[in-house]
Each structure stands twice: as C-alpha cells, then as structure tokens.
Amino acid sequence: EPEVTQTPSHQVTQMGQEVILRCVPISNHLYFYWYRQILGQKVEFLVSFYNNEISEKSEIFDDQFSVERPDGSNFTLKIRSTKLEDSAMYFCASRGETSGGSWETQYFGPGTRLLVL
Amino acid sequence: AQTVTQSQPEMSVQDAETVTLSCTYDTSENNYYLFWYKQPPSRQMILVIRQEAYKQQNATENRFSVNFQKAAKSFSLKISDSQLGDTAMYFCAFMPGNTPLVFGKGTRLSVIA
C-alpha cells in the first residue's frame, strides 16, 4: 500500500542552524501539508501546498520557514535559523487521490523528530 | 474559528471491554469531514476512521465505530473488544472543505490486561 515517507527520522541541530526536512508524498496525491506537534501538545497546521504553490499557511509559518517541491516527488520544509522552540515532531501529509480512492483523507508520514539545542 | 474539543484527557479500559471517546467541534460549515487518528508511542499518526458530514450513516471499521450527531456537532469513537495494541493517543480531527485539518488535544487511552 502506498505511504508517505519522511527523512530523517531524527535530527539534532544547534540553534541558528538551517535544517531541511524531507517528505515523499503518495505519488498520485495533489495536496501536501506540513504539521508539527510539540511534545505533549496537539498537532498544529503549518502550511499546505497545491499546484506548486502555497495554498494556505498558519501564523506559525513565518519567514523562517519555506517549502519546496523541487522535483515532482519530494516535498521539503526548510527552517532557516532554528530556535529552541522549533523542537517538535514534524509531520508531512498528503491527500487528493486521483484514481478513485479517498479524496479527502490525509495520510501522514512517520514524522521527523527535531531537537534544537 | 473552527475548534475541536476532546474533553477526556485520559481514559482506561479493560481488555475485551468497550470504550467511547468523545469529541465535539464548532463550525458554521455544512460540508466537512471528520476523522479519528491514533498515535501510538512511536508517534506515527494512523487513520482509524473517517466520516463525511453529508452521510447520516455512522462509519464503522471493524472494532471501531462512530456516533456522529451533526446537529449536536458531536463525533464520538467507540472501540469494541479493546486490545492492548489499542493503547495510544487518539486525536479527533475536522476538515471543512479543502482546508487543513484542525485537531483536538487528544485522549490518552490505556488498555489494561
């Protein structure tokens, strides 16, 4: 069964460093998302991406964040200068089955656990 | 603002018993989708069940079923014949149209042998 994959599974970085989190969505999906979950808290929306551009973003998604779909398969989240409070689990999700499946259901990757020291 | 409320931070159930997790939401939309996701200790988000708001029939997936009350904006999850592997955080989530998911704060369920 197709699934969303994410790399790396864990990342430790120093405050102020740039990190890139990578995701490979399900191949025939059209909508892509990044969410984050600070330990012990609920899942929060960061950004959605459709038709090669950002379709919606939250207040969390400030100028330090950017997303890209560089090659038609990968979907990346870049944090330019990490802060301590960026430490969280970052989830990629995709939806929009184009071949008769579930259009509205978002399928999540396993997450990247980011720790900023 | 669209909100999802899970009023039970923690619950426990004996294995083989039935448990119901509650969820309410607030929206002015008429067409939307509701989901329950399971998050085991690995922290992966796993879809448990989904419900389309325009369908009156409650969704079921094996031991999992929902009680969807649209007028009351309520979407509870019933787990029958609970198993140790059901131990996890359960998140209720809501998606009005083509918008991102809005999650509740979760309910931590422990299944006790």
Image (cartoon, helix red, strand yellow):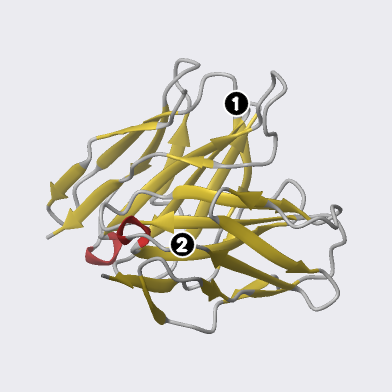
| Above or below A100: residue A105 | below
- Which quadrant holds residue B64? bottom right
Q: Position of residue B44 (x, y in %)?
A: 35, 48
Residue B70 has which mark?
none
Which residue sits at x=50%, y=71%?
A: B18
Q: Nearer the viewer, residue B60 or B96?
A: B60
Q: Chain of mark 2?
A: B
Q: Is residue B95 left or right of residue B77?
A: right
Question: Which amino acid type corresponds to the residue marked 1 in the rendered image?
Answer: His
Badge 2 crowding class, 10 Å Cα cut-off, few under 14, some 14 to 19, many 20 or more, is some
Closest to the camera, between mark 1 and mark 2, is 2
- Which quadrant holds residue A31? top right
Badge 1 crowding class, 10 Å Cα cut-off, few under 14, some 14 to 19, many 20 or more, is some
Residue A29 has which mark?
1
Question: Which amino acid type corresponds to the residue marked 2 in the rendered image?
Answer: Asp
Residue B81 has which mark?
2
